[in-house]
Amino acid sequence: MQIEREEGGRFLASVPDLPGVMAYGESEDAAVRKVKAIALQALADMIESGEEVPEPLKVLFAASVSGGPADC
């Protein structure tokens, strides 16, 4: 995730591995919360449609179908 502060004082958070996933906020925390929500929705849409999840983000979905924590 990248965070930039613009000249006007607002913050821009973006996820470079997900093109177009970015959000503005009046504080750094607000921008981060917003961009995380957008990124999660973008990833959910990618998974649902069968698209490949970018390699750096695969760690979020590393649990295997069998033998992983879901089988406990």
Image: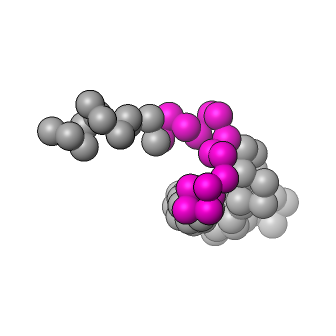
At 24% from the left edge and 43% from the top edge, which residue is drawn?
Answer: 70
Residue located at (58% from left, 40% from top): 57
Q: Magenta residues: mostly which secondary structure? A: helix
Which residue is painted at 26% across and 31% down in the image? 67
- Residue most toward the right? 7
Residue 66: % across, % down: 30, 35
> Does residue 3 appear in this view?
no
Q: In the shown orientation, is residue 45 left or right of residue 13?
A: left
Q: Which residues are magenta?
A: 46-60
* 56 is within the stretch colored magenta: yes
Which image quarter: residue 54?
Answer: top right
Q: Nearer the viewer, residue 13 or 29?
A: 13
Taking the view exactly as shown, the residue that stands out farthest to the top is: 67
| Residue in the image at 50% along x and 34% along y | 59
Q: Nearer the viewer, residue 63 or 19?
A: 63
In the rendered image, the quadrant that contains the N terminus is top right
From the viewer's perspective, is 6 left or right of 48? right
Pick the residue in front: 9 or 30: 30
Q: Using residue 11 as the reference point, say whether residue 72 is left or right of it.
A: left
